[in-house]
Amino acid sequence: MNRRKPRSHRLRGRAAGPVGLIALVVIGALTWVGLNVGGGDQDEAASPTTSAAPPPLSSPSSARTQLDTLVVKGRSPKTGYERSEFGQAWTDDVNVPDGHNGCDTRNDILRRDLSAITVKPGSRGCVVLSGVLVDPYSGKTIDFLRGEKTSPAVQIDHVVAMSDAWQKGAAQWDEAKRTDFANDPTNLQATDGPTNQQKGNGDTATWLPPNKTYRCTYVSRQIDVKARYGLWVTAAEKDAMAKVLTTC
């Protein structure tokens, strides 16, 4: 009897090893599932973070040097221009910063340019519901609220207007390049809706931001975009740009 008890104890110990190992595996698997169930954590990981900031601008003297590299030509006819020539509005299918990030371009720029933003639940941090814009064009502080009647208070301006680009080289581009241009954060700025409407398709010779303290930055951005995309300027436009840069 005394011999059998130790033997039985040893057998029970041997059997407990595999059982304990299985239990640990099951507990570990359940723990992993528990940590990864619920799309919230997974969605958050895949969400767009901050949108790309415009590239650093050159100094006024560098902007003047860059301006001198731009071709000076007359404005071509507007014949054939349509917004659709620049691709689907605010498409994410572009090869520029923030392209293919799962969020449309308009919301990318709202996230970049607004502060105190709130985003729509379930949109992976993409869709901006509200925020505050300190508008560089007008100097106004604007409360943004997403909605059919309220969204137009903040619009996304093409620093170099698409129509202006069409008449100064873009008509010869393929659609892919025009779509990239229309969604490039370098060429986009959230601004006051009425101010954007006043600008229309104007270039520097016909329109400048009412906020004079932003004009140097605005003109430098236009020069940078035109140089990047190989667009030309008219003589009047170049003169207006040079005049602004002398005040910087």
Image (cartoon, grey):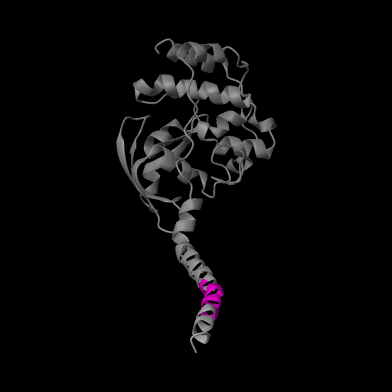
Query: Residue 203 appears at what percent x and percent y?
Result: 50, 25
Residue 204 appears anywhere in the view: no
The one of 167 and 1 positioned closer to us in this rendering: 1
Q: Is residue 64 above or below residue 110?
A: above
Residue 18 falls inside the magenta stretch: yes
The quarter of the image holding the C terminus is top left
Q: Is residue 82 left or right of residue 105?
A: right
Q: Quadrant of residue 235?
A: top right
State which region is magenta: 11-20
Query: Residue 240 appears at what percent x and percent y?
Result: 48, 15
Q: At x 61% / y 46%, what residue is drawn?
A: 93
Q: Is residue 119 above or below residue 139?
A: below
Residue 156 appears anywhere in the view: yes
Q: Is residue 115 left or right of residue 227?
A: left
Q: Is residue 6 above or below residue 162?
A: below
Q: At x 29% / y 36%, what residue is drawn?
A: 141
Q: Is residue 184 left or right of residue 210?
A: right
Q: At x 46% / y 15%, what residue is drawn?
A: 59
